[in-house]
Image (cartoon, coloured by chain):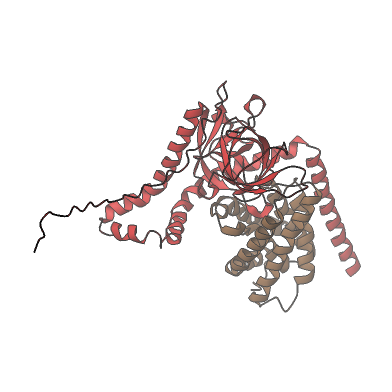
């Protein structure tokens, strides 16, 4: 009797494993039904993600406030004198103001290069269990977004549209290990390929081994055919370290990406690029050192000594 | 009997999946956070017979494959979860040192999470999936494992009761 039970158990296990292997084969062969299933799931999930974003927002703000308690102690002391109504208003508006600030910077960036953009709010972050770096935004094909469009943050490139659903889209972030972008160095125009590494530090590989790259060099996107997946001229990051090891086939460097992926609240999707390349117009200005006021005291001795 | 169990189990898996995608993923936890569905399925597997565990692994794996953030081909998570749940159930089901011992249960589940994530990276590499630098993979695997160690005891009583509800048994934890 036990043998019969074990036989059934093994048969079930074999059927399930064969089904899984069958699914992997179908997906690797690019059968559209499976991709449709993934898109359908995302379409069904998007209202829940939007609702979750709204519900979780105050809790996230609370934890953010707790994390930054030390830094904002003085600010909190100042706010204590305000009345309760003002404080409640501030808490409610905090999220909106942060997103507004990001949106303003995005519009400035896109306006300088004359990109036609669609703004969208980040409604969910992809799970890290699969080692991918993705976000979901609240705009999709109904808003005119298509696959392989450039995604901007307030400071530069954020990623690329990976999948589009009617009301949402999945963005592959520049930190994703599978992310690749052709870049050129502002000024010297050297070209190379930048790869995501799973965090804000990306890897750069220059095409020409004879050229020099320096710490502090600013990288811009080189642009793709028909501006997809990447429009030209978008700031990507700056070089923080150069690998000058002898015998390497191509020169490599470490790049710090401009976009702060931890605080992404609003992004812009470039749906139309200008016919002319913006060149180095979007190179971010270097931070200006704050001048320290100096006080000069002139002492003139009086002709007659004072008592 | 089996129809009743499936009709109760399936919505539970779906609810946990929606909670993971709509709520848990909203928190940008350092080190990758935790996967509620993964923990739930492994706990479910320990409490079930190997056949039921494999079936649960198949359901959860398929849902994880359908997630937009899944980087591998559809079926990768399914295959892994079937194998993992069967193995977890084989070693854990009926194990007296785990039943009634939440600490042992938590450590066992967390270890299973660690091995599942590690297996995902290995199978992903075989299938040509980009998983990032070695250091980043280590950080993510250890991050997810540590978060699982924290989250498992919190959710364990709920998961145990849900299993008892589906299978009409007494809660083991």
The residue most toward the front is: A303
A248 lies above or below A307? above
Query: Which of these two is toward me, A217 or A284?
Result: A217
Instruction: Give the position of the N terminus of chain B as an image quadrant.
Output: bottom right
Residue A191 drawn at (x, y percent): 67, 34
Residue A38 drawn at (x, y percent): 68, 42
Residue A101 drawn at (x, y percent): 42, 41
Query: Which of these two is toward me, A201 or A191?
Result: A191
User: How many dots with numbers?
Assistant: 0
Q: Residue at x 61, y 30 (%)?
A: A146
Q: Is residue A166 visible in the rendered structure shown here? A: no
A42 lies above or below B15? above
Q: Residue at x 42, y 47 (%)?
A: A95
Instruction: Give the position of the C terminus of chain B as an image quadrant.
Output: bottom right
The residue most toward the top is: A275
Residue B97 drawn at (x, y percent): 72, 79
Q: Is residue A115 visible in the rendered structure shown here? A: yes
- Left-right relation of B90 to A2: left
Per the rendering, the colour in which chain B appears is brown
Query: Which of these two is toward me, B31 or A49?
Result: B31
Per the rendering, the colour in which chain A appears is red
- Left-right relation of A59 to B40: left
A121 lies above or below B15? above
């Amino acid at each position: 009797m036990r043998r019969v039970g074990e036989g059934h158990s093994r048969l079930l296990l074999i059927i399930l494993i064969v089904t899984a292997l069958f699914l992997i084969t179908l997906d690797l062969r690019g059968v559209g039904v499976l991709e449709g299933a993934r898109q359908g799931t995302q379409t069904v999930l998007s209202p829940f993600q939007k609702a979750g974003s709204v519900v979780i927002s105050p809790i996230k703000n609370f934890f953010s406030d707790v994390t930054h308690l030390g830094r904002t102690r003085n600010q909190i002391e100042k706010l204590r004198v305000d009345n309760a109504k003002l404080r409640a208003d501030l808490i409610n508006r905090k999220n909106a103001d942060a997103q507004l600030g990001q949106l303003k910077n995005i519009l400035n960036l896109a306006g300088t290069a004359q990109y036609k953009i669609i703004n969208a709010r980040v409604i969910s972050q992809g799970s890290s269990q699969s080692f991918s770096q993705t976000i979901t935004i609240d705009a999709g094909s109904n808003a005119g977004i298509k696959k392989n469009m450039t995604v901007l943050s307030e400071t530069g490139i954020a990623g690329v549209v990976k999948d589009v659903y009617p009301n949402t889209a999945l963005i592959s972030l520049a930190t994703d290990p599978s992310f690749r972008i052709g870049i050129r160095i502002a000024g010297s125009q050297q070209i190379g390929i930048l790869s995501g590494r799973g965090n804000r530090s990306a890897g750069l590989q220059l095409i020409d081994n004879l050229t020099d790259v320096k710490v502090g060099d600013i990288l811009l996107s080189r642009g793709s055919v028909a501006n997809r997946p990447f429009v030209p001229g978008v700031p990507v990051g700056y070089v923080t370290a150069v690998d000058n090891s002898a015998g390497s086939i191509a020169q490599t460097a470490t790049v710090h990406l401009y976009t702060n992926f931890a605080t992404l609240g609003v992004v812009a999707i470039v749906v139309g690029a200008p016919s002319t390349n913006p060149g180095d117009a979007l190179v971010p200005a270097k931070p200006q050192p704050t001048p320290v006021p100096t006080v000069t005291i002139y002492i003139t001795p009086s002709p007659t000594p004072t008592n | 009997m089996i129809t009743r169990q499936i009709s109760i189990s399936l919505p539970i898996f779906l609810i946990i999946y929606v909670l993971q995608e709509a709520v848990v993923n909203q928190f940008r936890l350092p080190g990758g956070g935790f996967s509620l569905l993964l923990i739930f399925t492994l706990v479910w597997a320990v409490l079930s017979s190997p056949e039921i565990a494999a079936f649960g692994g198949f359901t959860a794996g398929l849902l994880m494959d359908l997630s937009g953030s899944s980087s591998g081909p559809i079926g990768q998570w399914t295959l892994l979860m079937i194998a993992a749940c069967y193995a977890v159930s084989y070693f854990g089901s009926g194990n007296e040192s785990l039943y009634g011992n939440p600490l042992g249960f938590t450590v066992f589940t967390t270890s299973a999470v660690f091995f599942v994530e590690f297996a995902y990276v290995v199978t992903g590499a075989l299938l040509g999936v980009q998983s990032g630098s070695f250091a980043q993979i280590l950080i993510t695997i250890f991050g997810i494992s540590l978060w699982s160690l924290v989250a498992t005891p919190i959710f364990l009583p709920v998961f145990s009761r849900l299993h008892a509800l589906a299978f009409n048994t007494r809660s083991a934890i």
